[in-house]
Amino acid sequence: MRILTDLSQVKPEPSCLTIGYFDGVHSGHRYLINQALVAAREGGLRIVLLTFHPHPSVVLRGAEPFYLSTREEKLALLAQMDLDLIIIQPFTPGLAQTRGRQFIDRLIERVGMVSLWIGSDFSLGYRREGDIPFLQRMSAERGFALNVVEHKFDVSSSLIRHALRQGDVALAAHHLGRSYCLQGPVVIGAQRGRTIGFPTANVEVAAERAIPANGVYVARARLHPPQGTPQDTASEERHRAVVNIGTRPTFDNGLRTIEAHLLDFDRDIYGQRLTLDFVARLRPEQRFDDIEALVAQIHRDVKQARQLLRVA
């Protein structure tokens, strides 16, 4: 699989092309891509995926980034599929002004598109003028095959983002087809957890990542090897975890953090990368009258997490 960062870098050859932002590479995305893959292999065509960064809403409407996957994480997910070429096209105001007809011609000339695979809600070009009826006309005029894949699953990236804003990580996982995860280095925090008997790993994630609503969660944690050692999955450490996302209202209502208490674990892991695969939300974040009440609740959280992880 090759990865290019602009359409201008592509050498045209007969290709089966699918286009989308593919945030999170959820179950609906994978279904569409697999349909295109099967058709490409049967037709002896190169299979090409065109995606964009940043998200069009960030460029066009100034929306706050709330990505289900960073650029690098999306690439890692797509790399698990049997694609020949991925193009990550920068989405710019200039690109947003491109007319639909001009963009289709560019795909034919630059990529060699002979077959286009898209979802039923797809559109491209200036003000989304390149909708399905437009593409059907262009298909007949320009001679490429258009394949519109109806959503087999009632799923969208927007639906998953909404679930995360509600703290419903179980629903997000259902639509993703896997646990929703956050990954980042373990950084030094306020270190209050250790003083009350529950040391935590403060995980620093990319600012643009979609973080679930404040609250206490059950998660499976994957501790990656330190830098300079082999980074294969076999060398990961697996742990159970209770994760607090929020501002610690019992202490200081400070900056929002992601703090993971790894069960039956107490070791210095500063600087190592930790991935949290969310399983369920236990409760909202809350303020307690005193530290003793907080500690008692954490004990209950840990007990419930152990029970959930035994059956999950």
Image (cartoon, rainbow, N blue to C red):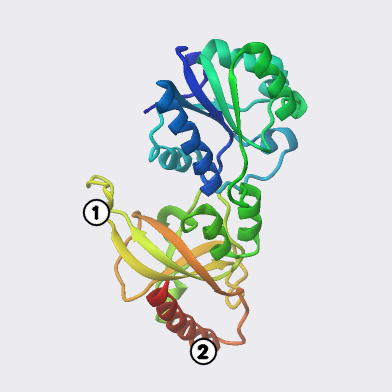
Task: Give the numbered dot on residue 33.
Answer: none
Which residue does the image show at 62% across and 79% down from the upper left? 287
Q: In the image, 79: left or right of 147?
A: left
Which residue does the image show at 43% across and 22% down from the upper left? 43
Give the label, 2 or 1, closer to the camera: 1
Kind of residue at badge 2: Glu
**In which image quadrant can residue 58 be found?**
top right
Q: Quadrant of the N terminus?
A: top left
Which residue does the image show at 38% across and 63% down from the upper left? 221
* Nearer-the-camera pick, 105 or 304: 105
- Residue 22 percent across, percent down from the top left: 55, 39
Q: Residue under circle 1? A: 234
- Residue 297 percent across, percent down from the top left: 52, 85
- Residue 173 percent across, percent down from the top left: 52, 59
Kind of residue at badge 1: Ala
Which residue does the image show at 57% across and 25% down from the upper left? 116
Task: Give the numbered dot on residue 292.
Answer: 2
Above or below, 144 against 55 in this view is above
Compare marks 2 and 1 and give the one earlier in the sequence.
1
* Nearer-the-camera pick, 14 or 59: 14
**In which image quadrant can residue 286 be found?**
bottom right
CB atoms at circles 2 and 1 under 8 Å apart? no
* Nearer-the-camera pick, 159 or 300: 159
Q: In the image, 13: left or right of 110?
A: left
Element under disc 1: helix
Element under disc 2: helix
